[in-house]
Image (cartoon, grey):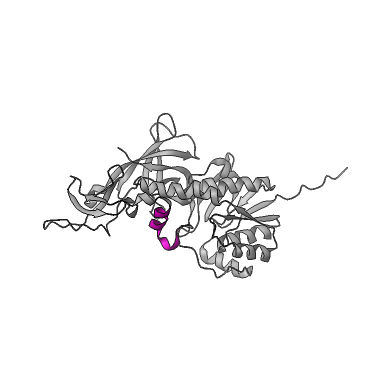
Amino acid sequence: MTRLPNPPPPRFAVALSGGVDSAVAAALIKEQGVPVIALTMRLQKEDETDDAAQVAAALRIPHHIIDMTGLFESCVMMPFANSYVRGETPSPCVHCNRLIKFGALMETAKTLGAEALVTGHYARRVETKSGAALHKGDDPARDQSYFLSALTQEQIDFMRLPLGSMGKSETRALALRYNLPVAQKPDSQDICFVPCGNYTSIVQKLCPDAFQKGAITDQEGCVLGHHHGLASFTIGQRKGLNLGLRKGDHNEPLFVLALDAKNNRVIVGPHEALMRHTVHLREVTWLGDSVPAQGLAVTTKLRSTQAPISARFFCAEGGGGGKLHLDAPAYGVATGQRAALYDGSRLLGGGWIVDEK
């Protein structure tokens, strides 16, 4: 009987950013005996790729630097700035994951012969009979499934997430064990293209006309102060409102209720006016089973830092959109943010929050 040769092991590409998470993900995959190549995205002209190159050299894996500066600006940075101009609060990391990391970079990985793309996200990928499912990371403090809520089933099938069951301390310990050169590198706390959290400087650079002086009014239209650009505000904001024209003795705290881009106006009011029982969504990405006409019980995160709240999800007629009926009211729901939808720990998808009006 002729013995057939064993098929070669699959080749995996690792999205190597130069941080500790992606470095450990690469080391774990290599330790499994899987051939690995490293892909580093250059997203801005000033990006440093030295750390990623050092990690690839330490692990002795081929390293490719992929220039995506133009694509990143058009698909992530400009939509980020334009979202603020429209009076929205954007979530650029969600766009980047869908269009850049698991979009353009994934396609590059395929052209290089890779059968999967590995990243350092803290989320779990679970194989099922109908394809891979995404679940929250085991460590609630590190879970990043929210930022993957716009991915398609095809993208999830191709991804691998070796850090999903870990916490950061375990990842750090593995980085030391593998003697990785970035083992002590601090975590990045900001959006990658927003230095020191100063997002208004990025918006001003990309959309210089975005910072026009306008009025801050109450719900009746009475002017209470002035602003120097809608991009400086988000729904639910309380501090920095500059209400110098406010009169009277009734000085309860006021919050940003709406950003009226058409009239360049910030509308403020009492906290109870932020209350929302229904949230409308567009461009819903759905990964679960079909949604019954009576809706589906889910939990939802309406911002990345928000705890999940229970709701019932309904698909819009004609598809593409949907709405959430919240079991308890939410405050500070912002147009432009992503609503991620869950069944327990499983990510069912999500949609972009739109104004109900």
Q: Is residue 154 left or right of residue 205?
A: right
Question: What x and y, as percent, mark residue 74?
Answer: 50, 46
* Residue 8 shows in this picture: yes
Question: What x and y, as percent, mark residue 182?
Answer: 58, 68
* Image point (47%, 43%), residue name: 349
User: Which image quarter is the C terminus in?
Assistant: top left
Please name the predominant secondary structure of the magenta segment in the image: helix
Q: Nearer the viewer, residue 17 or 316?
A: 17
Q: Is residue 134 left or right of residue 221?
A: right
Question: What x and y, as percent, mark residue 213?
Answer: 28, 52
Residue farthest right in this picture: 1
User: Which image quarter is the N terminus in?
Assistant: top right
Please say whether residue 310 is one of the residues in the magenta stretch: no
Q: Nearer the viewer, residue 70 or 61?
A: 70
Q: Give the answer, above or below, for where 169 lies relative to 124.
A: below
Question: What x and y, as percent, mark residue 106?
Answer: 60, 47
Q: Which residues are magenta?
A: 194-205
Please say whether residue 196 is one of the residues in the magenta stretch: yes
* Residue 344 shows in this picture: no
Q: Give the answer, above or below, for where 134 lies relative to 173.
A: above
